Image (cartoon, helix red, strand yellow):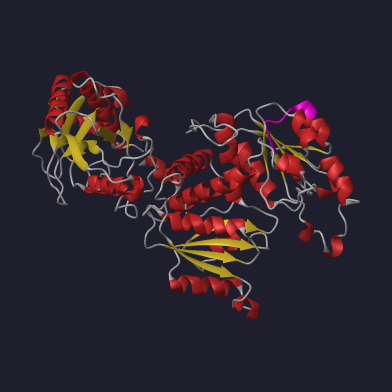
Amino acid sequence: MKHLLTTQGLAKDDAILLLDTAAQMAATQSRENKKLPTLRGRTVVNLFYEDSTRTRISFETAAKRLSADVINFSAKGSSVSKGESLKDTALTLHAMGADAVVVRHSASGAAHQLAHGGWLDAGVLNAGDGMHQHPTQALLDAFTIRRHLVGGVGHDGRGTDTSAGADLAGLRVAVVGDVLHSRVARSNVYLLHTLGAEVTLVAPPTLVPVGVETWPCRVSYHLDETLEQWQPDAVMMLRVQRERMSGGSGAFFPSPMEYSRKFGFDARRLAVLPDHAIVLHPGPMNRGLEISAAAADHERSVIVEQVANGVAVRMAALYLLLSGETGQTTDERNAQ
Amino acid sequence: MSPGSRMPASSAADARTVLGEDDIARALTRIAHEIVERNKGAVDVVLLGIPTRGVQLARRLAERLAQIEPSFDGEFGTLDVTMYRDDLRRQPTRAVGQTVLPGSLDGTIDDKVVVLVDDVLFSGRTIRAALDALNDLGRPRVVQLAALVDRGHRELPIRADYVGKNLPTSRSERVRVRLSDVDGVPDSVVISDAAPAQDGGAR
């Protein structure tokens, strides 16, 4: 693996290797000394053109736990505000000798352009590009689901994870909310499908993207019906992305109150689910809109654990991208 | 990705077996006795096997220690050294293995007598990585090393405390340890010629 840009087309073996590596990384994070020497002397640049708290901190923590040097670059307060292009920024990073670039950008495809534009020879990790993909978020969601529903880790997050090497075959995951604007939903649909899980998207028709029929999932417009009849093992709530709803496109639903009634997740809807089911949210949450406080703080909610797992998954991604000879394909690696 | 899985089957033609099943069993029994003798019992002894085959050897040593010293609980752990290797940038990406300490330790190896167990001692670089990995887990009182085969050609000032067999080899030869519970064939140590220079399995 040279880059991690998308979960679409990610081989199942690679996905499972990422999850297994993440499990080993997570095991090291309960030690007193959390730092590993693995990436000493490598440089990871966090290139963030969009605001982010948890993803940037998560990547920064992951890189530092592996002893890599971290350079944070955010568009605000940099020469980007003077009009520098992505290409010129990339050439600057190349000149500085970056080994990996973690990029978040509001334009879909920015990470792909950075990886394949010929500007850089560093590995590129997509930390979210526009409304396209956010692969490490999907991997941490899959990792969290696997730990709980396959590995037999309890609701308190304790217990031994026995899921090494396993996929998510047969599990049902409902992804609920603002699918239209969500790169998390896109990444999850493809990754969960690759891992053998069934996915149903639940959203009002206005928040379902054009072309969704080509995705490997089902679509429903009714949350209650899906929860009662389909009985998902995991429910993933998506944030209503109000910052992407302004502008010319107008309103996507009549009122927050109506959205909350029809698509918000609360204790009543939680009670409909099977006993083992878990609730996920990529954060940041709009409490009271897509998820009620009672559901968010419920013992079956794994939202806080997702953040901790995010560090382990990003450590795994950085390790697999940065260790080993560069330019190797999966086939060559498997042949060894 | 275990070292053994990379071996081409054709190299078996000029292979010669230096240790058989019984030899390996006797060597492990002797090492177990030596561990007890050197440490005057097995009170604080913690066996940590280095994947892949070191783990199985640690398990067998633990069984023998439990027979010799009833106070020994028969537990052993595994110590993965992948993330501490000095050749990560030269080799294809290695999968990270598991590190598991024996349950009775409560997650610490402080003030214990750690015996590292590996199959073949070669350059000593794996053991250097293991010492670094141990350092991050705690501060053992003593660290000792048991190896089934010592084939020489050390590149670092490292020696084994317990050796199953000293095996003079040339660098171009390849030493393979096969264990029934890993490889599905009877236990043996085999030397073969014509090992390609980039062999990642040799240590």
The stretch drawn in magenta includes residue A232: yes
Pick the front one: A140 or B116: B116
**In the rendered view, does A2 fall on the left or right side of B159?**
right
The stretch drawn in magenta includes residue A103: no
Pick the front one: A204 or B67: B67
Q: Quadrant of residue A222?
A: top right
In the image, the segment drawn in magenta is A228-235
Q: Is residue B78 visible?
A: yes
Which residue in the rendered view is the most extreme toward the right? A254
Q: Is residue A80 above or below residue A285?
A: below
* Quadrant of image for the C terminus of chain B: top left
Residue A249 image offset from top left, x and y in percent:
85, 60
**In the rendered view, does A186 fall on the left or right side of A29?**
right
Report the number of numbered marks.
0
Q: Is residue B15 visible?
A: no
What residue is shown at x 56% (from left), y 58% (from top)? Answer: A57
Q: Is residue A303 above or below residue B146?
A: below
What residue is shown at x 79% (from left), y 32% (from top)? Answer: A226
Which residue in the rendered view is the most extreme toward the bottom? A82
Pick the front one: A177 or B193: A177
Residue A122 image offset from top left, x and y in percent:
47, 62
What residue is shown at x 53% (from left), y 53% (from top)? Answer: A4
Q: Is residue A258 above or below residue A124?
A: above
Q: Is residue A89 above or below residue A106?
A: below
Q: Quadrant of residue A110?
A: bottom right
Q: Quadrant of residue B172?
A: top left
Residue A85 image offset from top left, x and y in percent:
61, 74
* Quadrant of image for the N terminus of chain B: top left
Residue B168 image offset from top left, x and y in percent:
8, 39
Pick the front one: A85 or B13: A85
